[in-house]
Amino acid sequence: MADAPYVPPKVWSPETVSGGRFANINRPTAGAREERDLPCGAHPFQLYSLATPNGVKVTIMFEELLEAGHSAAEYDAWPINISNGEQFTTGFVAINPNSKIPALLDRSTPEAPIRVFESGAILVHLAEKFGMFLPQDPTARAEVLSWLFWQVASAPFIGGGFGHFYAYAPEKYEYPINRYAMETKRIFDVADKRLAESRFLAGDEYTIADIASFPWLAPFTEGTIYNDAKTFLAIDEYRHVARWVAEIAARPAVRRGRIVNKLWGDPETQLPERHSASDFAGKRLG
């Protein structure tokens, strides 16, 4: 006999939640769960993150700024192990009340340190501070911001949607996998059609729109995310995305940024903490 269909209760209770990879840390409440200060280094920028797609956006941005000669963009990058709940310490919650990586403390101004959370906000903050990767021309700026927020809005469908139900959920169900597989492929198709007509997402120039989107789209193209998702979603058909991924992946700053705060895989590809350019010595870059 088939299982009876699920009937939502009149009032939802967290006790009814099933398992899954992050079940041990998921709760329906916000706020700190542990008293613990964050480490702090000597540089103007203190980044607290992990080398997930959202975290990699910011480390790529910092490395791009340094590659371009902005020595004032030196930063300390500290790992936040989200599987262990380190995003729920008092120190981290003080910077990001939403308890998500990445979070940034900007100490580069004479005033009190500026907290910036959410990856898109951090990219805009740094782009405006250093005058790079976000044009001032109103038309070009609007195009960049439109593609930036397209990515920010799309990521939950890819990660919390497709990634969760396809790779992390304790049981596989056809409806949610089909629902989010369709949306993930639609997102790739949007990008592929755009990249068929322009070198980068916002036009001929590399911008924060590309820096934001690359860490999410590249792992599918490279076949390094969610097990066999590349095959399952037939990602090879998006050849313009593949061209764009290959060009960006070859950038020296991107290769460095992809391994910062990485805590898994081959030790030669991990850089749990980053405090200076010399930390990359002996590492195999992404």
Image (cartoon, rainbow, N blue to C red):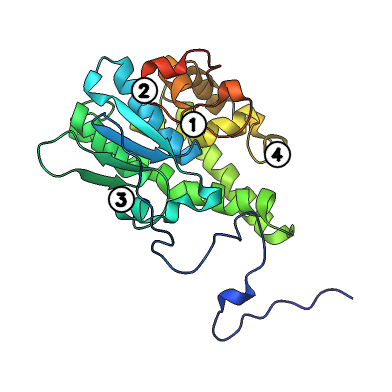
Q: Which residue is mark 2?
A: 63
Residue at image point 63% right, 30% down:
265
Q: Which residue is mark 4?
A: 227
Q: Which residue is mark 1?
A: 272
Residue at image point 56% right, 79% down:
13
Q: Give the mark nearest the N terminus, 4 or 2.
A: 2
Label number found at residue 178: none
Q: Give the mark nearest the N terminus, 1 or 3.
A: 3
Label number found at residue 95: 3
Task: Find residue 2 and report its image quarter.
Answer: bottom right
Query: Which mark is in front, 4 or 2?
Result: 2
Q: Are marks 1 and 4 in contact (CB under 8 Å)?
A: no
**Quadrant housing the C terminus:** top right
Which kind of residue does numbered mark 1 sit on? Answer: Pro
Mark 2 and mark 3: span between their CA atoms? 22 Å
Mark 4 and mark 3: span between their CA atoms? 33 Å
Mark 1 and mark 3: span between their CA atoms? 20 Å
Residue at image point 47% right, 47% down:
154
Residue at image point 90% right, 76% down:
1
Query: Which mark is in front, 1 or 4?
Result: 1
Which kind of residue does numbered mark 4 sit on? Answer: Asn
Query: Which mark is in front, 4 or 3?
Result: 3
